[in-house]
Amino acid sequence: MQHCPLCEHTQTHPYHTDKRRAYFQCTRCDLVFVDRQALLAPHDEKAIYDLHQNHPDDAGYQRFLSRLATPLLARLAESPRNGLDFGCGPGPVLANMLRDAGHSIACYDPFYAPDTQVLARGYDFITCTEAIEHFYHPAEQWTQWLSILKPGGYLGIMTKLVQDPAAFSRWHYKNDLTHVSFFSRQTFQFLAAQAGFELTFLGNDVILMRKPLL
């Protein structure tokens, strides 16, 4: 049996199997994750990302991202804040939107913006849009976010959420071979409870967390 890559719990169980991959679920945090033997090599993973077409001037993509950007900006103080867009991809559309609102944004992406120096300082907010489902080792990223997010800071995430095994079997989201970690409401509730974060779900795929002040 495979260990959970998020909470590192040793008790997991088979969740689903299709023609290409097997999926497991953690009995503690409810993360659904892909069999470790089915993870793509980095060059194969990047080849798929290179096919994505998320241009900075794409109005439709900006509207998509505004479902996170708008509520996040409403929660930030009017004074400029420092933020990190984690998993920005080749076209940092969200970062540009947040910069246009007056905030200072650093970008990190293991393939397209791999400067790890930006991960060594603190931030007032962190965004991660349509990237967390790609994490091979989500425990590492989560621990890192906890350390660099300042007290009172916001973590904004966009990802499609697992519903149940029946829906998962029909879910197109799992068919992308770069999607390997699938979160549910229960998973985010577990993480928020462990860290003492305030948790808000906005719609079906926008998650906001706030780190306590103390």
Image (tube, rainbow, N blue to C red):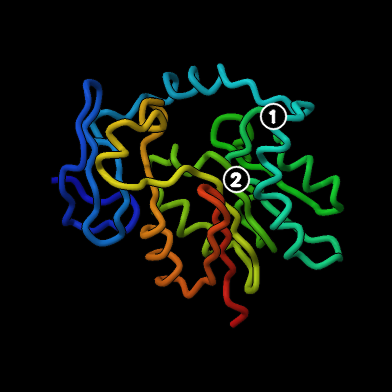
Proximity of marks 1 and 2: CB atoms separated by less than 8 Å: no
Q: Position of residue 121 (x, y in %)?
A: 65, 59
Give the secondary structure at mark 2.
strand
Give the secondary structure at mark 1.
loop
Pointer 2 residue: 86
Q: Residue at x 63, y 73 (%)?
A: 151
Pointer 1 residue: 91
Q: Is residue 214 left or right of residue 99?
A: left
Q: Is residue 12 above or below residue 61?
A: below
Q: Position of residue 72 (x, y in %)?
A: 70, 57
Give the total of numbered labels.
2
Q: Residue at x 48, y 19 (%)?
A: 48
List the single residue furthest toward the bottom.
214
Q: Is residue 180 above or below residue 197?
A: above
The amino acid type, in three-letter code, at marker 1 is Gly
Crowdedness near tag 1: few (<14), some (14–19) or many (≥20) residues, C-alpha within 10 Å:
some
Q: Residue at x 22, y 26 (%)?
A: 18
Mark 1 or mark 2: which comes first in sequence?
A: 2
Give the Cα separation between the discs numbered 1 and 2: 12 Å
Q: Position of residue 108 (x, y in %)?
A: 62, 42
Crowdedness near tag 2: few (<14), some (14–19) or many (≥20) residues, C-alpha within 10 Å:
many
Residue 173 numbered mark, or none:
none
Q: Is residue 96 above or below residue 101?
A: above
Residue sitting nearer the eye, 169 or 112 = 169
Q: Quadrant of the C terminus?
A: bottom right
The amino acid type, in three-letter code, at marker 2 is Phe
* Quadrant position of residue 62: top right
Q: Residue at x 65, y 67 (%)?
A: 153
Q: Is residue 106 left or right of residue 160?
A: right
Q: Is residue 207 left or right of residue 151?
A: left
* Quadrant position of residue 192: bottom left
